[in-house]
Every structure is written in structure tokens, then in C-alpha cells.
Amino acid sequence: MRKSPRASKASAWALFLTAHSVLVQQIETRLSDVGLPALGWYDVLWGLERAPEQKLRMSDLADEVVLSRSNLTRLVDRLEEAGLVKRERSEEDRRGAYAVLTEAGKRVRAKMWPVYQRGIQDLFEGQISDEEADVISTVLSRVLAAARAGGTQP
């Protein structure tokens, strides 16, 4: 018996959320098993490494890593305590602050990448064909564009 289109879409949504959660947890476990920090640390360090001058305003960094500002502030506090980032006050706006990647932060991110990359390859890329990857990319790009546009239909 075939599911209704509505039930299929609801099932796809549930599978998407569950797959994301399980994949992230598996990669977190792999990082932890070799004594590396959590995946959220990687995301912040990578976001800063790609930024001009390897620094971003805290609000821009929150957008880059898709974290709430309060969660980002706490995470940057921990990264700063570990010596992986530092904060700089904005010269233009004394209330504004930048998160700046340190050399130690670059080294930690570089150590994390092979573990993260292997997790992506084993747990995701190795489970789908090139054709399926194209379909997934097309669909998720459309979903993301619609969400960013406020949920409008194409």
C-alpha cells in the first residue's frame, strides 16, 4: 500500500531530522574518541578561518554558523578560554566585538578536519550515489532558498 503524498512528505521530514541528528552525533563521537572538541567548535573555527582577516563581528559569526547569539557568545567564551579565538573591540562601534581566530585555533581546526571529513565520507557520501547526491542537492537548495525567502513556494 502506497503512502499518500502528504504522509510521504511528513515521513521525509522526520527522516531528514533524524538522519541529521544521528550523523552529527556519530561525528561528535568520532571527534571525542580522539580527544578533539565538539563539532560546534569546528564550525566556529572554520567560519573564522574563511573570513577576511580571519575575524567576524559576533552577529555575523552567529549568522555564519547558524547559532543563536546567546549560544554563540557562550561557545566563543569557551573557545577564548581554550586560546582558540580572541575578542577584539570594534574601532568603529565600541559596543561591537569581533571574534578573531588564533594560530592555535587554526591548528585545532586542521586536526579536526580529517576526522570530520572521514565521518562525512563514511556516514553520508558512502551511502549515496552520485545521482542521488545531485537530487538531494537540488531539493535541499530549493528548500533552503524557500526558507530564506520566508517560506514562499517556488
Image: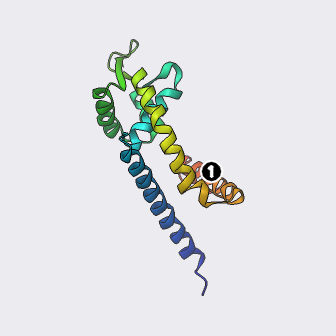
- Residue at 53% of width from left, 47% of height from top? 118
Towards the viewer: 42 or 135:
42
- Residue at 54% of width from left, 67% of height from top? 12
Residue 133 x/y as whole percent: 66, 56
Name the residue beneath numbered marker 1: 141
> Circle 1: is it few (<14), some (14-19), or many (20+) Cα within 10 Å?
few
Towards the viewer: 130 or 93:
130
- Residue at 50% of width from left, 18% of height from top? 53
Location of residue 78 with respect to 127 vertically, above or below: above
Amino acid beneath label 1? Ser
- Residue at 35% of width from left, 41% of height from top? 35
**For residue 138, side relative to residue 24 (left or right):** right
Which residue reaches farthest top?
A: 91
Residue 131 x/y as whole percent: 72, 59
Location of residue 139 with respect to 75 vertically, above or below: below
Quadrant in which the C terminus is drawn: bottom right
